[in-house]
Image: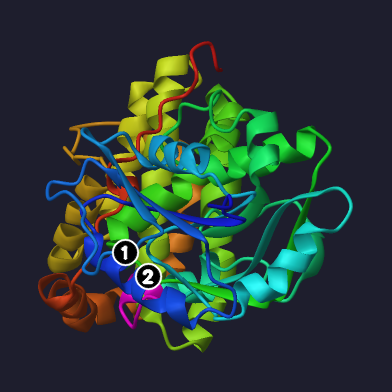
Amino acid sequence: MPSPRLSLCTYTFNDADFVHDLLAQVPSWLVRPDEIVVVDDGSKQPFAPLTPLPQLRVIRLEENQGITRAKGTGLSAATGELIFSMDCDTRVAPDWLAVNLPNLERPGVGLVGGALVHAAGADLVSRYLLAYGDNHNLHHVGEVEFIPGNAFLLRRSTWEQVGGFDSYAETNCQDHYLSNLLRSRGYALYSDAGAKAWQMRKIRRATLCRRVWKWCHKAVKGQMLGQARAVPYLFEVAVKPMLERSGTSIELGEPLFLYVDLLYMAHTVLDCLDYGVEAGLTTDPVRAGFLRRLAGLFEGYPRLWACFRTDLAGCGHLVLMPSAGDEDAWTDFFLFSDMLRNSGLFDWLERQGVDQLRLEDREEQYHFSSYAKAGFAMPSGAS
């Protein structure tokens, strides 16, 4: 039997429905894989295809290892000359491979991808990600610095030559690692907007905050300034982006986007403060002052504050209100408070927005995400 030329690799952990749907769509592709490898990353119910496929192999990890280990296992097990890696919650246009296979033949190209759009549904987080965050290389044709891990194509020889994920132990962000690794070895990354893919996983608000922060927390905390400079630095990295998006959110008719931005701001500042206290860059009274100022922002809006605290707990921050703190350190940081409160946003959130959030939490069917428990520890010795 001839060796397969093209292998498809995908990965599952307690989300077999995504894989079943993916496998059902493969026959509609203009170019179809000769081999399919499904890595079951310790699912409670072992994965089994609905219909036996002769070219399908299932590799089961008895205990959940995380997507980096699962993806590395699948890519290393693939026997095809070319490997098409797809997260099971990603869907591609039927011509994705037909468009991109020639791009892998370009001189010096080591990794190929395409346009990626978040298209999970009409829930708040999906709308927010579609507007602001989870879309890559939408109109680009040519070399790029990053290929998202949702769907990419590379040669097996390239994967083996760079050592795969052998030197990467993080659970998340392996696509950033692979992109940087290949570029450091002299390979080019090529993205073709004609190859379209869609991300279909629905996640909760707190998971969104953990997910986005996971991508950038090391860089932000690694540049954190100490003592009196800490709060102005946090304003630059946490508040300014929130304020810059506020006008767009209003124009889009999406006041709940402002709630999401407030939640992300509070999450990132609290994580930076936890790190800053540990690293000697700030103090416990400064951290306590932030919590007291944050609570003051929601004064008079008990339902909104209760909802916000619940979401913060989902982000990993159990809000226990300190009896005192250095609130003066945060006076300039919270100058945006009057703008938000006087705009009527908090009145609307208290009367209607909280009900919308709670209704969505009751009725929406969210999917598992490894980011829901993502950690934000800094490397030992970082300061």
Labels 1 and 2 touching (C-beta < 8 A): yes
Q: Is residue 127 visible?
A: no
The x, y position of residue 376, in whole percent, is 40, 33
How many marks on residues? Answer: 2
- The image quadrant that residue 321 belongs to is top left
Above-or-below relation of 293 to 272: below
Q: Residue furthest front?
A: 1
Residue type of the residue flagged with mark 2: Leu
Residue 228 located left or right of residue 14: right
- In this view, the residue in front, 19 or 238, is 19
Does residue 113 sit above or below 309 in this rendering?
below
How far separated are the C-alphas under marks 1 and 2? Answer: 5 Å
- Residue at image position (72%, 39%) is 182
Tag 1: amino acid: Val
Query: Any magenta on residue 302?
Result: no
Tell me, for residue 22, which label it has, or none.
2
Q: Residue at x 34, y 25 (%)?
A: 285
